[in-house]
Image: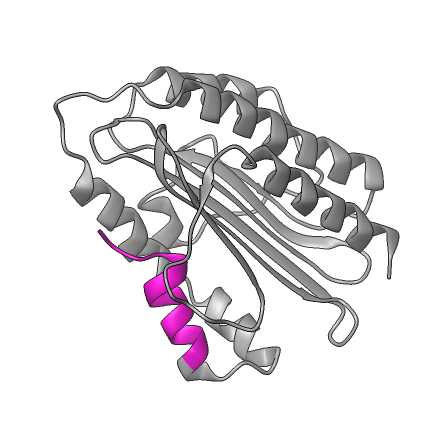
Amino acid sequence: MTSLHQQLREAVSWFVDEFSGEEAYDEGHSFPWVNHLWRGAAFRRAHLDVVDASDTHKLFMMHLCIFPHVNDPSPIYGFDLIAGPNKVTGAFHDFSPVAGDTPLDTYFAQRSAQKRWSKERQLPHWAQQIFSGRMVAAGNIQDPDELRELLDFAKENLAHYLATLGKPTRGDYTNEHNNYCHWQKQNPHTPRVMTALGFEPEVVSEFIQKCLFPEV
C-alpha cells in the first residue's frame, strides 16, 4: 500500500459519502470490481467505479460520471483518474457541455481557468468532440500536495454541481447525452488497460457498452 493509493481510497470514500442521501440502485450488472449507481431528484444517473489492482498490478483506476435528467441543459460531470505505484499518470475532469452556456458551464470554466497542473495533456480526437475547452487533463502527478489539490478541486466542483442541478426546461437533451456516450466509447485506453489487468475482453466490452456509458 502506498500513500498515493491510500489518498485515492480515501477520496473514493468521500465520493461515496457525498451520495449517501441519494437512491442507490442496481442495473443487474455483475463485474469483479467496485460499481456504485445512484439516481436522484436532481440527476438521472451517477456511476462510480473503482478498479483497485494496486496489490497485483500496482494500478488504481477510478471513474465518476453524472448525467442530469434529459430535460436539464446542465453539463455532464466527469472525473477519471489512473495511477501507478508512485504517480497519477492521467487525471481528467470536466463539466462536459450539453446545451452549453448554463451557469454550471460558466462556473467550471472560471474555476478551471485559475488552475495549472504540472503536466497538461493533449486531448485525442474523440475527446475533443465532447469535452469543454477548460477540461482538466493532467499527468505525471507525483507530489501529494498536487494530488490533494486535484482531488479537492473535483470534490468542491461535485458539491456545487449537485447543489445546482435540477432546473429542468422543456428541452430534450437525450441526443446530446447519447452523443457523449458514443464518443466516450471510442476511447481505446479503457479496454486496453482493463484487459491488461487480466479481465476478459468480453466482460470489458459489456461493461463499457452497458454500464460505463449506456445510451438512453
Is residue 215 visible in this depiction of the protein?
yes
Q: Residue at x 59, y 54 (%)?
A: 62
Q: Position of residue 93 (x, y in %)?
A: 53, 39
Q: Over which residues does the magenta segment extend?
A: 203-216
Q: Residue at x 45, y 82 (%)?
A: 201
Q: Position of residue 75 (x, y in %)?
A: 35, 31
Question: Against 166, is 12 above or below?
Answer: below
- Counting the numbered discs, the total is 0
Q: Position of residue 64 (x, y in %)?
A: 51, 46
Q: Residue at x 53, y 79 (%)?
A: 195
Name the quadrant containing residue 208.
Answer: bottom left
Chief secondary structure of the magenta portion = helix
Is residue 141 visible in this depiction of the protein?
no
Question: Against 62, is 201 above or below?
Answer: below
Residue 132 appears left or right of 51: left
Name the quadrant containing residue 46.
Answer: top left
Residue 35 appears left or right of 138: left
Colour setup of the view: one colour
Residue 207 appears left or right of 92: left
Question: Against 194, is 147 above or below?
Answer: above
Q: Residue at x 13, y 27 (%)?
A: 171
Question: Against 142, is 93 above or below?
Answer: above
Is 147 magenta? The answer is: no
Is 205 magenta? The answer is: yes
Of the 4 image quadrants, the one containing the N terminus is: bottom right
Q: Position of residue 101 (x, y in %)?
A: 30, 19
